[in-house]
Image: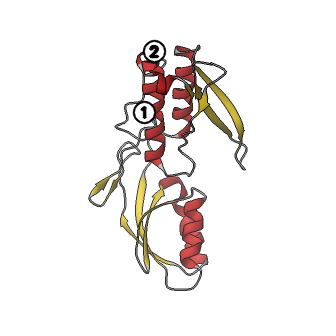
Amino acid sequence: MVRDVRYQVWDVKCSKDGQKTFIKNLDNKGSINICNENDSVISILVEGTRRMQLEKLLRDRDIAFVVTTADTGSIGAPRLGKNLVTRSIKQMNKDQVMDWHNFYPLHVIYSFLSSLEQQYPSRCTVHCIGYTVEGREIKMLKISSSHAGNSGSWLDGAIHAREWISAAVVTYIAHHLATHFDGLPESVTNKDW
């Protein structure tokens, strides 16, 4: 089920000390997404459900803004000026793999890791290696032949909220390793990934 979430693009004018820092803090917390930034204006993507709250926050802090795009459409294709950000929030079914033509939220990436573990139980295991400050699990996929003498190779992605490409790269590599493991050279299979 795809939620229909509308977005707006705002240009925020940061003319006083601390205003730019305040906007960047909102971005770091995931309340907004910074699309573009120059010396005094920051373009942000605002989810429709947060619009009124953000308007109040900015007005209370005397931060000027203008809505440049009132409705970018649903989350499946928000348009940012000439750029198109492609994001999919669809649920994955068991037989589906990530297509690497879309950017997926963390719960879909975690479902993908679990599906690799289910499809290749002799070489793939998913572990919780900790928790975020918000209490969410941090998951890790291990791909290995389970030989005691294996050396380790570490790849990570999705460390920061909007680093979409890093998650795509490591999931693509994980998919390739898991699905082609038996045909890969020993220099690859003699490692714990």
List the residue tagged with mark 1.
172
Whether residue 120 sits left or right of residue 130 in the image: it is: left
Q: Residues within 10 Å of mark 1 (few under 14, many from 20)?
A: some
Distance Cα–Cα, label 2 vs label 1: 17 Å
Give the vertical position of 23 relative to 33 (above or below).
below
Residue 1 appears in the rendering: no
Q: Residue furthest bottom?
A: 16
Secondary structure type for disc 1: helix
Image location (x, y in percent) of residue 135: 73, 43
Q: Nearer the viewer, mark 2 or mark 1?
A: 2
The image quadrant that residue 96 belongs to is top left
Q: Nearer the viewer, residue 105 or 128?
A: 128
Q: Amino acid at mark 1?
A: Tyr
Give the vertical position of 88 relative to 161 (above or below).
above
Give the vertical position of 99 relative to 103 (above or below).
above
Q: Nearer the viewer, residue 190 or 103?
A: 190
Q: Which disc is residue 109 wearing?
A: none
- In the image, what residue occupies the spot 53% across and 68% down? 55
Image location (x, y in percent) of residue 112: 51, 27
